[in-house]
Image (cartoon, rainbow, N blue to C red):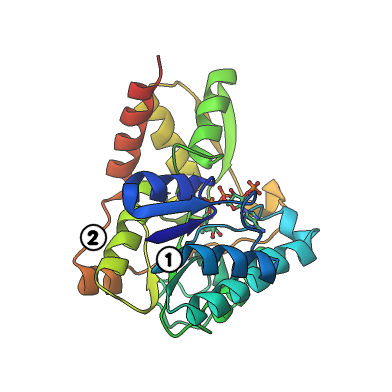
Amino acid sequence: MILVVGSKGMLGQELMALLGSGARGVDIEEIDITDLSSVQRVLLTLKPRVVVNAAAYTNVDGCETETELALQVNGEGVAHLAMISKEIGAKLVQVSTDYVFDGGKGSPYLEDDPTAPLSIYGESKLAGEMNARFNPDHLVVRTQWLYGHAGKNFVETMLRLGGERSEVSVVDDQIGSPTWTYDLALAIKALIEKGCRGTYHAANSGFVSWNAFAREIFRLAGLDVKVNPISTAEFGLPAARPLYSTLDCGKLAQETGFVPQPWQQALKRYLELRAAKRP
Ligand SMILES: NC(=O)c1ccc[n+]([C@@H]2O[C@H](COP(=O)([O-])OP(=O)(O)OC[C@H]3O[C@@H](n4cnc5c(N)ncnc54)[C@H](OP(=O)(O)O)[C@@H]3O)[C@@H](O)[C@H]2O)c1
């Protein structure tokens, strides 16, 4: 059985839907990953073959003030999962982020490129990566710019704003690959099925600025919204973000045969499914 920790989160729900009866989900009501005894109780009782950790403290700007909580959930929590998964002979899959990089490389990041997080969130997720490696049978899967049907995300924010306003300002100097949780879930499934170990990058292919991504969302949704460019500095969020942090996903493709679809195609499909679900 595959245990999805954080099963009520955006990625967690996607994993549960994809893995079906082969999976069991737990979230904060059943497991608190910051509490070793809670992790022990759940893992020793359920004895999964694989633990996928989709639980995290994901408020990037909130991490700047709630530093201790961020490090507890994203760092120590993963150490607990690594320790106990190792004890029961289970694989640990840890989901991580492009924010472990500083965005200064100028070309897509490879798995073994040096990390240099710019924010507390990035630091806490890097601590999680290191802690996951306590279990030799681990996968660290870095992804970026996630959106999915079950969570707060950029696509949903733009669609909401597009219904309320005729103009929005969106940063045009951060480049990345918007990634649909469905494609990330497929990548994780493929990595588990192939018995891979180590660090992998998984994101939809191609790259774009947040500004151009917003314009594509409005175009596909048929919303007439003017998207003004604004710089990251002008926007002024508390946490620093990498400006160019696309992930090279060649290793994933080479070792599993799975190639995530282009971001434009994924977004189109996401919006079609979203429209079909609405009355
Ligand atoms: N979202 C992105 O753009 C993005 C980009 C790159 C990487 N990632 C990574 O992808 C993974 C999934 O992200 P997501 O956006 O799906 O996250 P999410 O929607 O915020 O879900 C995280 C889940 O973890 C739960 N949780 C929080 N603290 C916990 C604890 N101490 N013990 C057990 N469960 C706890 C949360 O419960 P509550 O809601 O009750 O707190 C929530 O259900 C994370 O590792 C994240 O760092 C995300």
Reading the image, the residue beneath label 2 is 259
Reading the image, the residue beneath label 1 is 48
Which residue lies at the image location 51% right of the left edge and 66% below the top edge? 96
Q: Quadrant of the C terminus?
A: top left
Instruction: Report, in whole angstroms, how far the alpha carbon at label 1 lies from the one at label 2.
Output: 28 Å
Q: Position of residue 258 (x, y in %)?
A: 22, 62
Q: Indicate yes or no: mark 2 CB to ligand 1 under 8 Å.
A: no
Q: Position of residue 35 (x, y in %)?
A: 70, 66
Near-viewer residue (141 or 233): 141
Near-viewer residue (14 or 63): 14
Which residue lies at the image location 53% right of the left edge and 84% below the top edge? 134
Query: Vertically, is 200 above or below 32?
Result: below
Query: Vertically, is 263 above or below 54?
Result: above
Residue 191 sits in which quadrant? Answer: bottom left
Query: Vertically, is 60 above or below 41?
Result: above
What crowding class fits label 1: few (fewer than 14 Cα within 10 Å), some (14-19), or many (20 or more)?
Answer: many
Which element carries disc 2, helix, strand or loop?
A: loop
Q: Indicate yes or no: mark 1 CB to ligand 1 under 8 Å.
A: no
Left or right position of 77 against 104: right
Work out whether mark 1 precedes mark 2 in sequence or the reverse, and give the earlier one: 1
Which residue lies at the image location 70% right of the left edge and 59% below the top edge? 239
Near-viewer residue (278 or 21): 21
Q: Is residue 118 visible?
A: no
